[in-house]
Image (tube, rainbow, N blue to C red):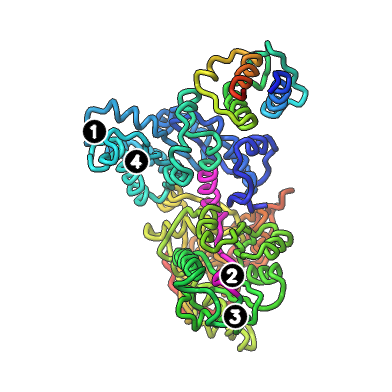
Amino acid sequence: MQQEEIAARLKGIMRKTFDDDGLEVTAETTAADVEAWDSLSHINLILAVERAFDIRLTTREVRAMKNVGDFIGLIGRKTA
Amino acid sequence: MNNTSHGDRSLDYLALVEEARLPASGVAVRLAVTAEFSTPHLVPLLRALAARAGVALEIYEADYDSIEAEILDPGSGLYAFAPRYVAILPAAEKLKAKFYRSEDRAAFAARMVVRFTRLWAALRTSGATVIQGNFVLPSERVFGHFEAKVAESLGAVAARVNAGLAEAARAENHVLLCDVDHIAAEIGRAAWADEALWSLAKLPCRLDHLPHLARAVVGQVLAAEGRMIKCLALDLDNTLWGGVIGDDGLAGIALGEFDEGEAFVAFQHFLKELKNRGIILAVVSKNDRDNALLPFREHPHMVLREEDISVFIANWENKADNIRKLRAALNIGFDAIAFIDDNPVERDLVRRFLPEVVVPEMPEDPALYVRALGAAGLFETASFAEADRERPGQYRVEALRELAKDEFANLEEYLASLDMKIAVERFTPFQVPRIVQLMQRSNQFNLTTQRLGAGAVEALMRDENVLPLTVTLCDKFGDYGLISVVILRFAGAEIEIDSYLMSCRVLKRGVEQFVMNEIFKLASARGVKRVVGKYLRTAKNGMVAGFYENFGFRKDYEWSNGDTAWSLAPADYAPAVVHMAESRVIF
């Protein structure tokens, strides 16, 4: 799957999870930049991503992600 | 719409999270959630599932792992919140950690049970009902299959804790059990567990399964609030037996020890067990009545017999109309009826015309009927009293009474013929479970709709300004049991009717007239100036909006929401004519 396609789908999932239809993110976006992105919704985001891309993320992978770019890269590796 | 608390709608986690964002409306109920795991993900699910049943949950969420801190401290936020329900949800991971550190493993289970019974005792005086979760039995087994043979192994100890909690809860009227281990086992304990999510976020299970836990907690709250299935309306052909009795005849239907016949026998056994625990069975069938009755009377493999069916409706009218008739005969809400039919067209029709009736999907294969009905989560209850076993029979007798009624020229003559015996007495400890249950179940003939738990009921019995009364009734057809609860409060020169509720099975028997006569006799004897009472309107108690007016009370006030306040001086009360053959009044 192309990075752009993953990024677009991830943005859609984030908009739904954070209940924000106008949300825009870049590779550098972190949880600190998005008001609704807290530890609670982070878990929901991971579940939504796991379901959408049919992958399972490990604790280490989840902990290692620092920004949206990391997330896109991780999804890319897991779906390759 | 109430269908959904019973599992018809989605239990999808993410869908529920979105649903929880919608504003909730309905009756407000206060629930405190205390847990050894992290609850922020659980709370929206509780809200969403309760909202589907028209209950707006107000939730007090205790901090992570602060069960003792909240419940053992009378000054805690939990007590300030004054919840009607307190969920205590422990985590298997915590049990494991404590067990591994424990030096006295032989005493571990007993001590763990005492830990929770202390919490229950602390909550008793608050009047709150406890919803106690148990532990998901651990998958890890250092002894392999030998584990259960070692009394002090983790597996054996955890099982003992769960058994101990269940046993202790049986002795406590104000404690309900939430069998979390059963939920996990139904899903599969390996699929339920999510060790990574526990270490990451202290969640008790995989997020996908969290709605099942939420449904169990909400189901118990709803049941305790009187929102439960009371009657199953059953189709016959291809539901209770295979084939069509009208076409295939008695010998031709599939029922018994061959082919699909076995599945129908198993299904009937399950239904009979439900009946034995107080669920009313009714038949709603498109059939000739004599044909429909034939298997009940003559088929050797029928488990259900004619006397197991409280109301038997077999005709060629549409089923929605017949369910309306059934509802009228039983005097219960549509949302207390579940309609069981193998035919998707009939299910669809009933859903369309009677959206409140619960209509579970039924699988094509009758071998899966029991499982489907079980998985729908229809049969939650917050109490079980021996008297429940009698209920289906009482409803059946009621139908016979209705027939007898036609033989009399007027109602008075009919009532006199019933040979009724009534007793009005103070609450006794032995009646508490039934009192709590009646307060849970009565929606229609209920003036103020207070739902008191056992703790609150026991507190009333000790209050010298309160006269809490029960009414029991029997007649020549049978025993109705405890059918009405009236709570009087002495306040200065007034007697206040604080609660007044009655089972609709005894409408138009003169019970409320008899009781009101007694209330005013008491008022005169005590020399009070007025008897006062309120009618607090709900979606379901319109039946008693004119209750006080009919007794000649004066309306003192009417609120904009339809609630009203009434009063009447003893001298102005005109005693009602009653037809009790025998009465016993013990204040």
Q: Secondary structure at mark 4?
A: helix
> Counting other residues with Cα less than 10 Å from the Cα at mark 4, is it few (<14), some (14-19), or many (20 or more)?
some
Q: CA distance from mark 3 to mark 4?
A: 58 Å
Q: CA distance from mark 1 to mark 2?
A: 54 Å
Going 55% across and 30% down the picture, which residue do you hit? B40
> Counting other residues with Cα less than 10 Å from the Cα at mark 3, is it few (<14), some (14-19), or many (20 or more)?
few
**Which amino acid lies under the numbered mark 3 shown in the image of this protein?**
Asp
Residue B512: x percent and y percent?
A: 57, 68
Between circles 1 and 3, the one closer to the viewer is: 3
Going 51% across and 64% down the picture, which residue do you hit? B279
Give the residue at mark 1: B105
Whether B60 is among the magenta residues is no
Give the residue at mark 2: B238
Hey, which residue is sitting farthest right in the picture?
A22
Q: Secondary structure at mark 1?
A: helix
Q: CA distance from mark 3 to mark 2?
A: 12 Å
Instruction: Give the magenta range.
Output: B215-243
Quadrant holding the N terminus of chain A: top right
Q: Chain of mark 2?
A: B
Q: Is residue B109 visible?
A: yes
Q: Chain of mark 4?
A: B
Which mark identifies residue B117?
4
Q: CA distance from mark 1 to mark 3?
A: 64 Å
Between circles 1 and 2, the one closer to the viewer is: 2
Q: Are marks 1 and 2 in contact (CB under 8 Å)?
A: no
Foreground of the two, B155 or B283: B155
Q: Are marks 1 and 3 in contact (CB under 8 Å)?
A: no
**Which amino acid lies under the numbered mark 2 shown in the image of this protein?**
Asn
Give the residue at mark 3: B248
